[in-house]
Amino acid sequence: MQGHPDGFGVHYRAMSETLYDLHAHTTASDGSLSPAELVQHAKLCATDVLAVTDHDITAGIREAQQVGREVGVCIVPGIEISVTWSAQTIHIVGLHIDPEDPQLLHGLEELQAFRCWRAEEIGRRLEKAGISGAYEGACRYANGKIISRTHFARFLVEQGRARDTRQVFTRYLVNNKPGYVPGRWATLAQALAWIHAAGGIAVLAHPARYRMTATKLRQLMGEFRELGGIALEVVSGSHSSDDMQHFAKVSRQMNLYASRGSDYHGPEQSYADPRRLPFLPASCHPLWESDLWKACAEHAA
Ligand code: AMP
Ligand code: MN
Ligand code: MN
Ligand code: MN
């Protein structure tokens, strides 16, 4: 394989290599493409294996699998579970889950209920800050599906309160801003237990996004591994090239496999398009080469 021309040591794939994108969203949560559209887009990006990993819901998976069979993209059923760990929100991706597993669905119901309450609370807080109709506006964007801060962000952009969703987050939706409501999500142990009950494997999503010290992050990864987590998202649409190189090294040190996911939310969102996502650095142990992955893939076939 050739080195990346930018000199980051990120590798292009060989022509024969399978292209994996193990993190993406649909309209079942805060993506802007329907499951069918997401799969069509993955096909355009030459993705061979696509994991559908909506926030706290599995509702988009069946449609994606159906279209995947039609167009020739292998769909991995997945989930991105919101977790509160050490007073911070972190995300755990579950892959090869059974989307109908009762224990998983029961756990997710709690998170969905919290999302409904939080959305109303965000609406009330924004109202106090002089922005009316945000709850109704966000609901319109969520369109009966799971509601997320992203839907508030889209509404506030529409209202001219910020130039893009990223700016909405920094102005309104993060800690110390008027529309911020602290998360009360699953525990790390619960998230892993639900994923394992559903026959899946757990990946720690986009580690570079967490605002914690290196020591704290190591503690998180240690607990994650003790609970049976096996991989770290090394290549993510929200990681810089430096982040990818750094977490490639960390994944080896921590004895975790490496995953690769665009975290695609649709064409107008802020993270990288899957087409621009680098391949895993050559030094990593790809998750799809693990025995657990192979066992899951065989089971699904
Ligand atoms: P929630 O799970 O409802 O709290 O919303 C979190 C989602 O908001 C993430 O999955 C991202 O899609 C999006 N998000 C979080 N931070 C930002 C940001 N700074 N800019 C744009 N989108 C963001
Ligand atoms: Mn999201
Ligand atoms: Mn995430
Ligand atoms: Mn995501």
Image (tube, rainbow, N blue to C red):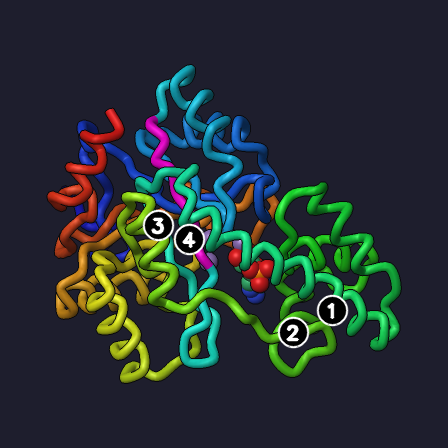
Q: Amino acid at mark 1?
A: Glu
Residue 211's spot in the image, x, y percent? 43, 77
Q: Amino acid at mark 3?
A: Gly
Instruction: Give me the C-alpha separation between circle 2 and circle 4.
Output: 26 Å
Magenta span dominant secondary structure = strand
Residue that carries the numbered disc 2 in the rendered image = 181
For the residues labelled 2 and 1, say whether their Cβ atoms are less than 8 Å apart.
yes
Closer mark to the observer between disc 4 and disc 1:
1
Where disc 4 sits, the SS reads loop
Instruction: Give me the C-alpha separation between circle 4 and circle 1.
Output: 30 Å
Residue that carries the numbered disc 3 in the rendered image = 94
Say which label, 3 or 1, has the lower sequence index: 3
Q: Residues within 10 Å of mark 3 (few under 14, many from 20)?
A: many
Say which label, 3 or 2, has the lower sequence index: 3
Say which label, 3 or 4, has the lower sequence index: 3
Residue that carries the numbered disc 1 in the rendered image = 121
Where disc 1 sits, the SS reads helix
Closer mark to the observer between disc 3 and disc 4:
3
Closer mark to the observer between disc 2 and disc 4:
2
Vertical side of 159 occupied by 223: above or below: below
Residue that carries the numbered disc 4 in the rendered image = 237
- Is ligand 1 closer than 8 angstroms to the Cβ of mark 2? no
| Membership of 258 in magenta stretch | no
Residue at 30% x, 74% y: name it: 220
Q: Amino acid at mark 4?
A: Gly
Q: Residues within 10 Å of mark 4 (few under 14, many from 20)?
A: many
Say which label, 2 or 4, has the lower sequence index: 2
